Amino acid sequence: MLITIVNRNKAEFYIDFLHQYEVNMQCTVMGMGTADVNKAKYLGLPDNEKAVIFSFIREDRAKEIL
């Protein structure tokens, strides 16, 4: 299983990207970042709305996907 955490506005891009590699199943859940708002802004991470993509990939394709 490959777990990918991305900003929500990029989720569809990564879902489509992973689909090209014969992914057996994908499940996406929405999440929120846990960083303090001030610390996140300081680090340049203002968007704390995330998508967590669980992808079941073939083991022989793992290096290629990563």
Image: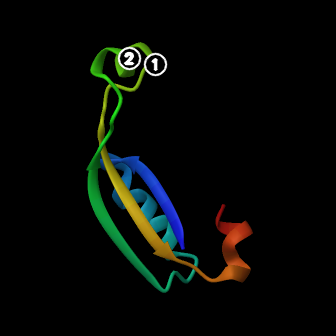
The x and y percentages for residue 40 are: 37, 22
Left or right: residue 63 versus residue 41 is: right
Q: Quadrant of residue 34?
A: top left
Callout 2–callout 1 Cβ contact below 8 Å: yes
61 vs 38, nearest the viewer: 38
The x and y percentages for residue 36 are: 31, 23
Q: Residue at x 35, y 73 (%)?
A: 27
Left or right: residue 25 versus residue 28 is: right
**Labelled disc at residue 43:** 1
Q: Which residue is mark 2?
A: 39
Question: Looking at the image, is 17 positioned above or below residue 22?
Answer: above
- Badge 1 density bin: few <14, some 14–19, many ≥20, Cα 10 Å: few
7 vs 32, nearest the viewer: 32
Question: Looking at the image, is 27 positioned above or below residue 40?
Answer: below
Question: Looking at the image, is 33 positioned above or below residue 40?
Answer: below
Q: Residue at x 71, y 68 (%)?
A: 64
Q: Secondary structure at mark 1?
A: loop
Residues under labels 2 and 1: Cα distance? 6 Å
